[in-house]
Amino acid sequence: MNAGLRKLILLPVFLCFLQCADAEGIRPQWKDFCPKGLEDAEYKEIQWFWPEGTKSTQAIYNYWAERRMEFEKSLAECDSIQGGLNNSCYDELRKRQLFVTEQYNKDIQQKQISNQVWRDIHDKGSSPIMINIFMK
């Protein structure tokens, strides 16, 4: 086989390899959006008799399990798009997941601030100085 024919045969194979490698590189993965350790979180109904700490922890697991199901559904839709147009779908999926994760983190931060303000207000009301004043 001459060199020109060999190049002509290898060119489409090489281009396909590059396109497939590029598609894999741009295809989002759940671990890129989910906190470490919650990648495989399982949804479970929260039971009324569970301790509060268990309930709040399971609520976090449930949130990330639901997000993963939504992500996988959207990813399957992007995978089904033909003709190389799925790259823009992957990009939109990535942007949406980053936005939702950013909003989630802002909400968590706001709750922490609110809880700290509440603790600060209530801790002042039960300080030893105040107790001593009322005991006179």
Image (tube, rainbow, N blue to C red):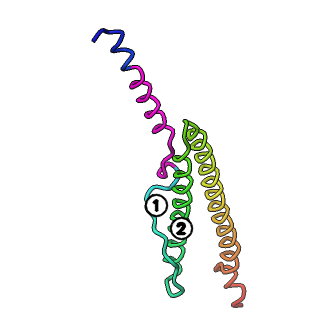
Where residue 67 appears, as percent x and y from the top left, is 55, 60
Above or below 120: residue 82: above
- Residue range of the region highlighted in magenta in the rendering: 11-32
Above or below 7: residue 72: below
Q: Residue at x 55, y 47 (%)?
A: 78
Q: Nearer the viewer, residue 96 or 21?
A: 21
Q: Does residue 131 appear to the left or right of 12 in the view shown?
A: right
Where residue 46 appears, as percent x and y from the top left, is 52, 79
Q: Which residue is mark 1?
A: 38
Residue 111 forms part of the magenta stretch: no
Q: Which residue is mark 2?
A: 60
Q: Residue at x 46, y 65 (%)?
A: 41
Where residue 122 appears, as percent x and y from the top left, is 68, 77
Q: The N terminus appears in which quarter of the rendering?
A: top left
Residue 28 forms part of the magenta stretch: yes
Q: Residue 84, located in which quarter of the rendered image? A: top right
Q: What secondary structure is marked by label 1? A: loop
Above or below 110: residue 45: below
For mark 1, does the 10 Å Cα neighbourhood hold few (<14), some (14 to 19), or many (20 or more) residues?
some
Q: Residue at x 54, y 55 (%)?
A: 71
Q: Residue at x 49, y 52 (%)?
A: 30
For mark 2, does the 10 Å Cα neighbourhood hold few (<14), some (14 to 19), or many (20 or more) residues?
some
Q: Nearer the viewer, residue 135 or 94?
A: 94
Q: What secondary structure is marked by label 2? A: helix
Q: Nearer the viewer, residue 44 or 88?
A: 88
Magenta: main secondary structure: helix
Q: In the image, what residue type sits under mark 2?
A: Ile
Point out the tag, 2 or 1, that comes first from the N-terminus. Answer: 1
Q: Check contact, mark 2 vs mark 1: CB within 8 A.
A: yes
Q: Does residue 118 appear to the left or right of 62 in the view shown?
A: right
CA–CA distance between discs 2 and 1? 9 Å
Q: In the image, what residue type sits under mark 1?
A: Leu
